[in-house]
Amino acid sequence: MVIVQEKGKKGTLFCDRLAHFAVLALIDEAMLTPKPGLVDKESKGAHTDMSIDLMLKSAYALQSTFAEMAEASIGQFPSQDLRVKLAEIGRRGEQIMFQTTNGVNTHKGAIWALGLLTASAAIHGPHVSPQKIAQTAGEIAKYKDRCTSELITNGLKVKKKYGVSGATGEAQLGFPHIVHIALPVLWRARKKGLSETTARLDALLSIIAHLDDTCILHRGGTEALSSAKAGAKTVLDVGGSSSLEGGRALIELDRMLLSHNASPGGCADLLAGTLFLDRLHGSFLNNGGVLVGNINF
Ligand SMILES: CC(C)(COP(=O)(O)OP(=O)(O)OC[C@H]1O[C@@H](n2cnc3c(N)ncnc32)[C@H](O)[C@@H]1O)[C@@H](O)C(=O)NCCC(=O)NCCS
Ligand SMILES: Nc1ncnc2c1ncn2[C@@H]1O[C@H](COP(=O)(O)OP(=O)(O)OP(=O)(O)O)[C@@H](O)[C@H]1O
């Protein structure tokens, strides 16, 4: 593994840039419209306690959390110590989010996924593929969370009830839904000349079609999850979100999710992770090996 050993001013600039990319990924995800069941520019989806303004406020408030995660990881290898440090920063990030939103869970799953990816990107520096960054993020996630709280979360309940692996399992496997599903769909759609919104929506739908999302399971059970997977697959099979039939199927998927009061929040987190890795990769490629932000390792 190639490890970036840059501390000091250069390293701090790089960490700030990574944190900025993480925040931008959250903003891009929130602004993407129309998303089924989720908060976007036109709808609150299944979330009566959220709004687009709240999502953006929460995203901006997390810049320092992601910067701290990057700072803690630069010059390090995945290790138990690093896992403990990141968990501590992550929990403080959750507090910042809850203070910012008056107790609404806008980005808990996203702090987890983007936190691990940001930490891994800081370990590697910009010369590394999205696949490698996701794989190292998985290695960090495999270390035990020694400070785990006594709280029984929705995710834990659902994982026990339905035997799925949830947000932890996805991370420990190196984010397969980002690397093997969403990024290829995003890049293929752009290559075909589809609009950026279409490419992102199709990437989100490709995740919904495959992921065991504990948000959907918690609110709507297995019926909602299998209908969500089938509905998203239909949109893609009939031509994607920009086609006439696909657009109709997308509206149908949104209606179905709302009828279960269900939302693919975990899928949205993984879309944010996809957009983070995509931006990092694009920024590096488009600048002859210099990550925008003037750090050239
Ligand atoms: C692992 C986390 C997400 C807790 O997960 P848990 O399964 O207990 O469920 P909880 O209901 O609290 O949140 C799960 C969230 O993950 C997302 N999610 C749901 N399903 C999936 C899935 N299959 N894949 C990815 N994300 C998913 C959703 O946004 C959901 O709301 C995390 O919050 C955590 O452990 N935090 C502790 C701090 C920490 O270790 N941070 C490290 C930062 S690097
Ligand atoms: N655009 C979005 N709209 C809604 N949720 C999103 C969006 N983007 C990401 N999410 C993720 O969805 C999760 C919120 O889902 P949800 O409200 O179902 O969680 P919960 O608090 O566990 O459940 P409940 O509200 O049923 O108690 C957040 O942790 C967040 O990471």
Image: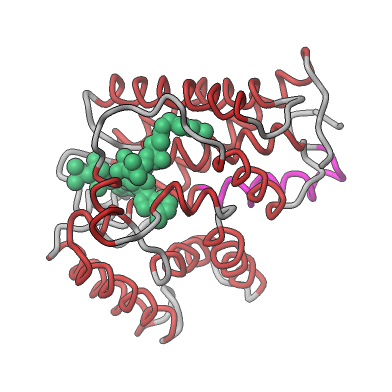
Q: Total marks drawn?
A: 0
In the rendered structure, the answer to whether residue 40 lies left or right of residue 171 reads left
Q: Is residue 262 visible?
A: yes
Residue 72 appears in which quarter of the rendering?
top right
Q: Which image quarter is the C terminus in?
A: top right
Residue 290 vertical placement versus 264 (above, below): above
Q: Position of residue 110 (x, y in %)?
A: 43, 41
Front one among 235 and 92: 92
Front one among 89 and 19: 89
Residue 8 vertical placement versus 56 (above, below): above
Residue 244 vertical placement versus 21 (above, below): below
- Which residue occupies 77% across, 36% down? 125
Q: Position of residue 11 (x, y in %)?
A: 76, 21
Q: Is residue 268 visible?
A: no
Figure coloring: secondary structure
Front one among 234 and 78: 78
In the rendered structure, the answer to whether residue 255 lies left or right of residue 86 reads left
Residue 179 appears in which quarter of the rendering?
bottom right
Ligand 2 quadrant assignment: top left
Front one among 8 and 43: 8
Residue range highlighted in magenta: 273-290
Q: Position of residue 61 (x, y in %)?
A: 42, 23
Q: Position of residue 210 (x, y in %)?
A: 42, 70
Report if residue 17 lies within the magenta region.
no
Residue 95 appears in which quarter of the rendering?
top left
Report if residue 280 lies within the magenta region.
yes
> Farthest residue toward the top?
8
- Which residue occupies 56% across, 55% down? 173
> Farthest residue toward the left?
259
Q: Which image quarter is the N terminus in?
A: top right
**What main secondary structure does the magenta stretch of the protein show?**
helix
